Image (cartoon, rainbow, N blue to C red):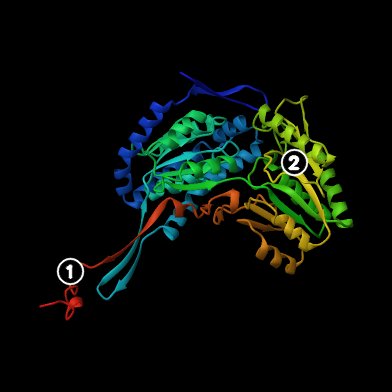
Amino acid sequence: MTMLQSLDPATGEVVWEGEEADAGVVHSALARARRAFPGWAALPNDRRVAHVQAFKAALEERREGLATVISRETGKPLWETRGEVASMIGKVAISIAAQAERAGERRNAMPFGEAVLRHRPHGVMAVLGPFNFPGHLPNGHNVPALLAGNTIVFKPSELTPATGAAMAECWAEAGLPDGVFQVVQGGRSTGEALVAGEIDGLLFTGSAGAGAHFRRLFADRPHVILALELGGNNPLVAWDGDVEETASIVVQSSFVTTGQRCSCARRLIVPDDAFGRDLVEAVDSLARRVIIGRWNDEPQPYIGPLISPAAAAAAKVRADELVARGARELRSFKVLDCMGPAFVRPAILDVTGVDVPDDEIFAPIVQVTRVPDFDAALAAANATRFGLSAGLVSGDDALWQRFVLESRAGVVNRNRPTTGAAGSMPFGGLGESGNHRPSAYYAADYCAYPMASFEAAHADGNAAALAGMLTP
């Protein structure tokens, strides 16, 4: 028996402890999900909707407790985890609307009867959740997948099992039939057993490296639908405007959630002029004022610790590597041992003219590149193998039209943080940031496949179509 623990990254206290699911447990869960699938898929849509609405009611009843659990496991401040739970609640209505719009039923009259479009569920879905939004992001897979008629085996991140367990309790309160939604807790070996099992879909949120692994792994399993929501080395071009407002957008884009959002701005591209110099100084000044603290501190901090001491140590190595390549430290990256080994200080590194890796560093580190003109800014923004989010800060409509036309990213914002995204829109990226199956409002697309039918109540007129074209 292998035991799994999650720890509060701010204090090191044990938040959750339980047994890790081995391959036998995983395969048993998949078998239960397979048995449950036909009945759940055959259930009328309004009854599935009723179960999902009951899940929403359970979330609302547990709102504060769930926010506390997420904060304790991730270290995120309560203001942020309360927002995460609110997004989970809001996801239900959005998913119901998306299911009706993008994966509902359509009928068109034909001379012989009807052309009918239906959408059918894939079957048993494996959902692998991330640690940074352990409630909201897997919820964005789970709700639409269940609405479509799939059954689910969900493995939360091994760093946030308590959040996964709390979500399972809410689904249990929703009265789902046995086997429709199950949670298996564990680390790498549990995940490997799950993706190796008899599944019809893998819905994954995580790193680009893991996404590339899954692409290779499922190359010979074309019946398995893959929906990969991955990371990014996201650019923010800050070109003109009010320096204070622009600096606020930079700080929110780069340092929110301690830099642990896949849509965070990793690269700040500025003009090599007085505005660019003033802006970088303002970002540095604002970063020094950002409150760092524990999730339940008062006043509330803007950022908490990274997910673990190991994550902080790894980020420090990455920052040091950039400096060794020639990056100039405008604000150095530090592990704040006085607060705890997972707490870090946000960094601003000038990498102008430096050959740096095109990688996502999942920490509050922003790399500044100074360019001579807007053509160079666009080229720098697109110089990445990723394509999740991008942003432009400018009051110039013509520049925005160029930017939105030429940007290679799935989320492109203007005068707003790169991390802003609406649940009523698709969310996903290009290149190493995904596999062209965006989530959020478009999750309905990968949770069901279209079935087109010609239908007539009686077999009339078919023989007449052959008249004169048959031998006597």
Measured as percent of width and height from the top left, residue 181 is found at 40, 38
Residue 441 got which mark? none
Q: Residue furthest front?
A: 471
Measured as percent of width and height from the top left, residue 272 is found at 86, 56
The answer to which of 455 and 222 lies nearer the viewer is: 222
Residue at position x 46%, y 46% in the image: 219
Determine whether 135 is above or below 465 in the image. above
- The quadrant the C terminus occupies is bottom left
Which residue is denoted by mark 1 in the rendering?
Answer: 459
Residue at position x 35%, y 37% in the image: 33
Residue at position x 39%, y 48% in the image: 223
Which structural element holds mark 1?
loop
Determine whether 462 is above or below 369 in the image. below
Q: Locate residue 25: give its quadrant.
A: top left
Residue 136 can be seen, yes or no = no
Question: Mark 1 and mark 2: span between their CA atoms?
Answer: 67 Å
Q: Residue furthest left?
A: 472
Q: Locate residue 193: give its quadrant.
A: top left
Measured as percent of width and height from the top left, residue 54 is found at 42, 43
Which residue is denoted by mark 2 in the rendering?
Answer: 365
The residue carrying pointer 2 sits among few (fewer than 14), some (14 to 19) or many (20 or more) residues within 10 Å by Cα, namely many
Q: Compare marks 1 and 2 and give the one earlier in the sequence.
A: 2
